[in-house]
Amino acid sequence: MKSMMKILLRYVFSAAGIALILLVVNFTVLVVWTIQSTGIAQKDYSIAQFADGLTLENGVYTLSEPIRDTITTQYQWAMLIANDGGKVIWSLNLPGDVPRYYTVTDIASFSRWYLNDYPVTVWARSEGLFVLGREKGSVWKYSIEEQQTMMDNFLACIPAVLLLNGFIAVLLALLFGLRLFRSLKPLAKGIEDMAENRPVALSTKGLLGALASRINQTSDKLITQEAALKKRDDARTTWIAGVSHDIRTPLSIVMGYASQLEEDPELPPAKREQAGVIRSHSERIKALVSDLNLASKLEYDMQPLRKKTVSLAVLLRGVTAGFINGGLPNGYTIDIKINDNTQNFFVEGDEELLKRALSNLIGNSIKHNPDGCAIKVALQRDGMVCTLQVSDNGTGFRQDLLENLNTSQNPSELPNRGLGLTIVRQIIKVHGGTTACYNLPQGGGEAVLSLPGLAGKGG
Amino acid sequence: MKDIFECKLLIVDDEPELLKMLDTILRREGFQRLVAAADCHAARRIFASERPEGVILDVSLPDGDGFSLLREFREKSAAPVLFLSARDEDENRLLGLGLGADDYMTKPFLPRELTLRLKAVLNRTYFPAALRQTAKPVFKLGETEIDLNSGTVSTKTGQLALTAKEFALLEKLYESHGHIVTGDSLCHAVWGDDLYGYENTLMVHIRRLREKIEPEPSAPQYLLTVRGLGYKLTGADGK
């Protein structure tokens, strides 16, 4: 809904902006037009200059040459009406339908107006009235008359009117926007629901009905697909659980007899040793099967998590002591370093799974470095995140495995070797943490687990 | 009953090969009175007629499950039951133990582990006195003798008494002597809490304990510090 409010606000602002821009554009066009049309009218001479271009010498009127040209080309005709008697005493190109005598009433009625539909302009000279006529229909004239107070208020009113316009524009935009907002709101809710995999059933009436019905369809499709996927995942997990269950009984028999043969004093040592190999490899199969089962359950969220408050420092000490007490083979050492600020750091997690993750990492270092190595376990804290590092000075991770470990988002895309690390990644993932693996420049590998701490505890 | 090997054992599993193997293992171990059943129906019948003193029970059976069988058996007899199941889910383990099973093992298993657990279960049931050790250990660290019954430390120069905390620490360390005991476990044993906040207190008590049991407390030979983890009691010579 937040984004919808944002859209609405932007809509209103843009409407107001458009109104403003239109206003400015209109005003500019008006100004430019006015200036241009004035330019045409006053291109060469004003009416006074025309009038002054007519000179009287020895009783004969002479019009200067450039004025005459201008009148002929741009206007149509001109005349001079004498003050006394109203007779035309001089004229140029005077059309036939223009009278040669004028009464005061005639003059009053055409002055600054039309004479026989010819738009005319007049200029008073000492001896008479200079009249300049234009072609019929070439000029539109209108006389404006307003109350003085009205004109006085007019200038003050302009900003008020502009303001009012702006206000109305915003208000209208808001109203239309709200209408749109209201019709879009259920759609937005529907899309949100769809993103969170909730079923969506929007009303398909109204303007956006078609859109709503498409959203409904998409939601149905998503839910069906989700169900199908879950069914497939469930089937896969159940299948793996089934196989790992079924393999246990025959494996028991293999392990049982092999173990008995291994301990049978009547057998020659070489045979007993062979039985021991069968037994130890059966145990490896056993570990693999249970790893596979756990990995598939973690992958599809079918492993129940028994979460409780776990202190990582305590867990780390316990697992490390367990490895040492269990008898580390010769050539292996484990060094533990727990930063003081992690002593009261707690995570909400499944203790057994977290122990498993840590044991897998230490176990990996031992397994992949048969000639022995020095293992370092360290716990550090940065704010509400704890990082647990397990490193060794052995051979490190295989390059291809390493690339896959750090780039692949989906643990199931990891190579089928090294289920141990896959499980570590999955366990850390279900605890909301991250796993990263590196090879150290001085040799050896390092796995870094980051786990978020329990809010409100151990701050 | 003189010993646990006289117990009559009922083994229930639907896999004949496994029954045969269990029979071999248990006979070799010394158990002579063994009966077997391959399903719930046969198990009920044999349980009623033979009255076994111990049961090894599979969970998944062709005509039912071991859990309900256990419930029925419990109504009739107190014979110990050990589950041997191919289901490894913790849920099942907890369910089994919650129903009153005496132990729960998952397949595949090592024969030795099975026999050890079975013997422990039978011992607990039929010879509880054998396990109920009234006497606490007495052991020697070099020339120093420690008696956990009286909580005293005897050296050539005389006898010292352990305080309650020192006693609890030493008892915990001796329980797994030769192995590292984490500071957390020690604090749990003595104060019922994790190490955090008790580091200094623990160090003080360990120092006092060393003053009593070590010939040279500043260079301990028996009660060793394992840096970053906890402590270890070595060289204990039990009596």
Image: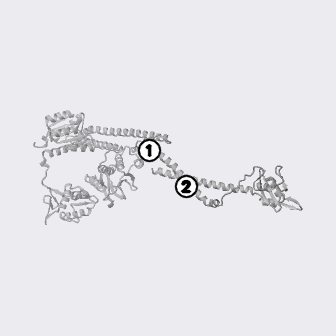
- Whether residue A67 appears in this view of the structure is yes
Residue A45 shown left or right of residue A362 in the figure = right
Chain identity of mark 1: A
Q: Chain of mark 2?
A: A
Q: Quadrant of the C terminus of chain B?
A: bottom left
Please, what is the three-letter code of the amino acid marked with disc 2? Phe
Q: Which residue is mark 2?
A: A167
The percent coordinates of residue B125 (x first, y second) are 14, 45
Q: Position of residue A428 (x, y in %)?
A: 35, 50
Farthest residue, direction left: B2
Give the position of the N terminus of chain B as an image quadrant: top left
Classify residue A25 by image quadrant: bottom right
- Mark 2, other Cα within 10 Å: few <14 / some 14–19 / many ≥20: some
Please provide percent x and percent y for residue A451. Answer: 35, 53
Mark 1 secondary-structure assignment: helix
Mark 1 surroundings: few (<14), some (14-19) or many (≥20) residues within 10 A: many
